Amino acid sequence: MFNGSNTIIATWFHADESDSSGSYSQTLGVSYSKRHYQLYLQCIYVFFQFLEIHKRTEDRYLFVNPHGYSQLDETLLTFLSKSQVKIVILQNTHIPPALFGKKWRNQFFILDILEYLAKLEKNIVILDSDVITKSNKGIKFTEDHEVLGYILSNDQDEIINGIKVSELSKLYEKLSGEKPSREIGYLGGEFLAVSGNSLRKFHHLTELYYAKNWEFALKGETFFREEAHLFSIVSAHFKLDVGGDQVISRIWTQPWTFRSIPDNLEELIFWHLPAEKKTGLRRIYRTLSAGEYTSFKQDQFFEKYVRESVGVPHYSLKKLVTDLIDLRSGLLRHLSFRLRSFFGEKSS
């Protein structure tokens, strides 16, 4: 059981700078803009507020790079301090080489986070910041298991972020020198749970394979693109409990792209809401940061408000209108950015 002071729940914020910026599909635009930073800082506020609301007892950590720390304003710092969140500032020593491209460039910052956490020898649960807590239940591991994984795909022919799922088993064999004991599936990167007694080995393997990976890339061979690829491969070395889908689900909420509401919604501890950064999570942030949570009087009214805000399990006409209003200015800015980029390239 993962809960209490033997366990750390953490999230992270990496503020890109212009010379090492990346491209992230859920946010669009320039990743080193104040607007981009603010989107994630609002999520972080909501993330830790929900841990507080549900009275979770794990130690709370926020990891940031130095430029990220400089973006935390006094209001957020005060809130984090009152919520007993330990802020850890780390340099990102895992920025991929230029040949890697723009996508997911800051995702390997999590290896620096693992290096820090491995020294503490506690159970860890690392979550993306656009996750909200829905329960104070303990996070259960099957007996004797060391890593709890959230399997997003076992379809070996599916292409996820640049490589087929089947390539994960092939990369495992190249990296380790042995065949995997089982077919490797793709683990969602928004959730990583590792037992304290396995964490040093887990971190060691991520560092080893991260370094080897770029050798493959330089030779023009298949290589992993992002941290979830790496964690899927490394987890195959451990007694893996694949019951993460009983703990968390990636919930797609917008009707004009793709909606996916899990059958076990009410049993989950965490909801991952990647499409709600600019809409529902932002509205919840405004409510919480204005101190309006207490005005709900009873928890069921707040729960109703949260569900209506993020469109789970139902997407209402009211949410459609508010979403379109929230997204309108952002879409216009993104279109303007793309047009400027296009005509700038044409004229150069």
Image (cartoon, helix red, strand yellow):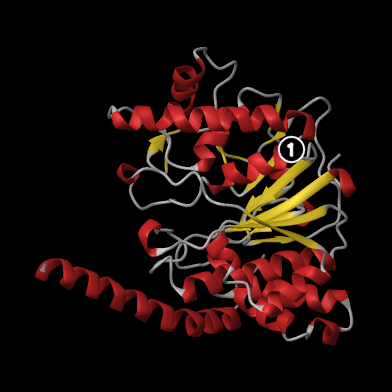
Determine the residue located farthest toward the top in the rendered image.
178
Q: Residue at x 63, y 60 (%)?
A: 129
Q: Crowding near pointer 1: few (<14 within 10 Å), some, many (20+)? A: few
Q: Position of residue 220 (x, y in %)?
A: 27, 29
Q: Position of residue 110 (x, y in %)?
A: 58, 46
Asked if residue 261 is positioned above or below residue 181 in the image, the reply reads below
Determine which quarter of the picture holds residue 141. Answer: top right
> Dot 1: what SS?
loop
Determine the residue located farthest toward the left in the rendered image.
347
Q: Residue at x 53, y 64 (%)?
A: 67
The residue to which callout 1 is attached is: 119
Asked if residue 85 is positioned above or below residue 236 in the image, the reply reads below
Q: Position of residue 209 (x, y in %)?
A: 50, 28
Q: Tell me the amino acid under the disc marked 1.
A: Lys
- In which quadrant is the C terminus drawn? bottom left
Decide if residue 43 is on the left or right side of residue 95.
right
